Amino acid sequence: MKIGIVGAGNIGSALTRLFRTAGHEVTIANSRGPESLAELSAETGARPASIEDAVHGQEVVVVAVPANRIPTLPRELFASTPADVVVIDTTNYYPRQRDGRLEGIEDGRPESEWVERRLGRAVIKAFNTIEATHLQPGARPAGAADRIALAVAGDDTRAKSKAMALIDGIGFDAVDAGAIAESWRQQPGSPGYLKDFDVEGVRRALAEANPERQPEWRATPNSPGTYESPA
């Protein structure tokens, strides 16, 4: 499968390694340009490219940039992308640590619903509930007793099925978490966030989630601070 990854931070880099190990053709891009990706490219065989080239001609596009960088992506990035291309959003909103106040999310809109409006494109929400450092060592073959499950939300059943099959193919179980409007169930602060649950654990956590964003996951007048000292 041809996969483009926009963002080569912790999540983007880990997914590049997993997708390449699974035999996928991967194109990677970031805001610093292809030359900054030479080391990851040499390690994995992924093709470094511009952000536009990481989107065009792909079957799946993974958007793995910080939430506060979503508005800085090229305005027409997905304008000519065919409808059957699956766009996966890995974004988490960290207002006090990194992102500052983002209107829309602060008003109660689920993070990926906000991303959809910014991109002008429907997305599948996935890969946001696991630590990046757990992705590679956490991969397990199908049927393994300790296989980690990942929540997957989205409105397009075909796109969601394709994303779930991709997740299964790199070593994780996938749990249908409902529509994008319900994706608050897997946002930071939810019961399943960063827990590495199995299928039943993820389903239970999704059912127990509360739509009200807790104070520690809301911006303050001093936001953002840092991960070490949230503000």
Image (spheres, rainbow, N blue to C red):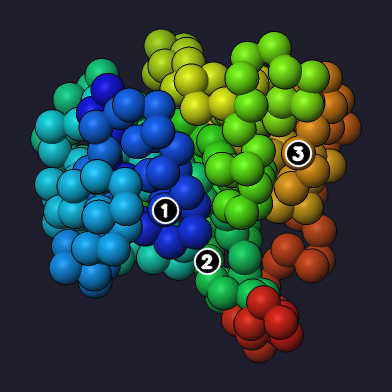
Give percent across and percent down for residue 174: 61, 22
Q: Amino acid at mark 3?
A: Asp
Vertical side of 230 occupied by 192: above or below: above
Observer-side mark, 3 or 2, equals 3
Mark 3 or mark 2: whose residue is earlier in sequence: 2
Residue 138 falls left or right of residue 200? left
Q: Amino acid at mark 1?
A: Ser
Rounded to the nearest angstrom, the CA distance separating label 3 from label 2 is: 28 Å
Rounded to the nearest angstrom, the CA distance separating label 1 from label 3 is: 19 Å
Dot 1 alpha-carbon crowd within 10 angstroms: few under 14, some 14 to 19, many 20 or more: many
131 or 223, which is in the foreground?
A: 131
Give percent across and percent down for residue 183: 63, 35
Give percent across and percent down for residue 89: 45, 42
Q: Are marks 1 and 3 in contact (CB under 8 Å)?
A: no
**Secondary structure at numbered mark 1:** helix
The residue that disc 1 covers is 13
Q: Are marks 2 and 1 in contact (CB under 8 Å)?
A: no
**Secondary structure at numbered mark 3:** loop
Q: Amino acid at mark 2?
A: Leu
The residue that disc 3 covers is 196
Dot 2 alpha-carbon crowd within 10 angstroms: few under 14, some 14 to 19, many 20 or more: some
Q: Measuring 39% from the left and 65% from the top, which residue is drawn there?
A: 69
Rounded to the nearest angstrom, the CA distance separating label 2 from label 1 is: 25 Å
Give percent across and percent down for residue 122: 38, 32
Residue 171 visible from this viewpoint: yes
Residue 121 falls left or right of residue 94? left
**Secondary structure at numbered mark 2:** loop
196 or 65, which is in the foreground?
A: 196
- The circle on residue 149 is none
156 or 194, which is in the foreground?
A: 194
The residue that disc 2 covers is 102
Q: Disc count in the image?
A: 3
